[in-house]
Amino acid sequence: MTEQIQQQELLAAVGQKLKAAREAQGITLQEVSSRTRIQNAFLEKIEQGELEGLPGFSFVRGFIRNYAQMLGIDDPELLEQLQAMGRVAQATPPPPMKSSTERLLDAEHGAGLPWPRLVLLALLTILLLWVGYLLVRVFLPSDAAYEAPPAKAPVVQAPAAARPAAPIPAATPAPAPAVGAGVASAPAGRTAAPPSALRVTVRGLEDTWVRYALDRKPPMEILMHPAESATLDADDEVRLTIGKSQGVSVYLNGEEVVLPAERDRLVADLVLNKLTVLKIRN
């Protein structure tokens, strides 16, 4: 608790210095938010010295640096206060793990199963139903089998021994991979995108936040962690804003997009479209 109070006092001192510099230049908080791409609510909490509601220290440090750079502040004391906040953050112990009883209560109140388990359970249920259907077809008399109504096409293909012999086709196209914007494994080679479409893969290298907008839809934000990746599909364009330039690597239709080499730099409104694909490949 002592470390948290000390960190909050340091944040309050930094926030007061930033607020005073902003007001001296006649700049509103909304203008700062528009120019730095930092949410207005985060800026208010930094100026007021409120830790609650802010992301981790690495994000807060990036926000403060971008804020000070926008105001043109080059103050060694501010840098020392940031370093002190970092030392306090490292000394702060992680929050205690929840007990098994609390975890069970969380699950009972709607935490639910993670989606990979739900998918696995669904596949196992379909497989069991299909095996049961095959057993019924094998052990029921033939008359009963002919009188039974035709079953719907199964999702899981029957084993070759249980299906009637049929000529082997020359080539069977592989099913198209599922398209989604959630966190998934990074592609081994080039990503096969649908015709006239864009596929952007964002691979996490460090903890950072990413804001994206697909085809001029309302933007959304995600937190990226190392070894995680997100796949974004669009028809016309993808707009990205990245909290730290070294925090992620970006691929457009399998081709790597070169990001600024400067560390801790905010990459704002990076537009990726079909013209970008042509420029990269040429």
Image (cartoon, rainbow, N blue to C red):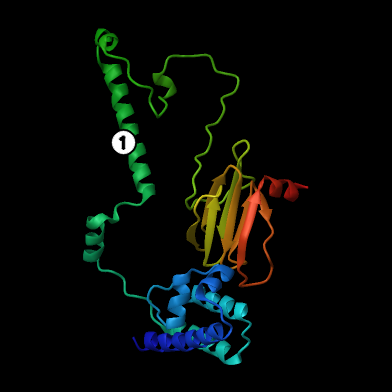
| Residue shown at 50% from the left, 56% from the top | 219
Q: Residue furthest front?
A: 26
Residue marked by disc 1: 125
Residue 255 lies, in percent from the top left, at 68, 50
Which residue is drawn at the image coordinates 37% and 48% (left, top)? Answer: 115
Task: Give residue 53's position: percent from left, percent from top.
Answer: 39, 72
Q: In this view, does 141 lie above or below 5?
A: above
At x 38%, y 22%, the residue is 153
Note whether residue 12 is visible: yes
Q: What element carries label 1?
A: helix
Count the marks: 1
Q: Residues within 10 Å of mark 1 (few under 14, many from 20)?
A: few
Quadrant of the image for the N terminus?
bottom left
Q: Residue 281 appears at what percent x and percent y?
A: 74, 47
Residue type, numbered disc 1: Thr
Looking at the picture, tell me which residue is in the foreground, 165 or 119: 119
Q: Quadrant of residue 158?
A: top left
**Image side of residue 92 versus residue 70, left or right:** left
User: What residue lies at 57% left-to-right and 57% top-to-bottom?
Assistant: 203
Q: Is residue 87 visible?
A: no
Q: Residue furthest bottom?
A: 77
Where residue 249 sits: x, y (%)? Answer: 61, 59
Quick one: which residue is furthest to the top in this view? Answer: 143
In this rendered view, identify the residue nearer to me: 81 or 176. Answer: 81
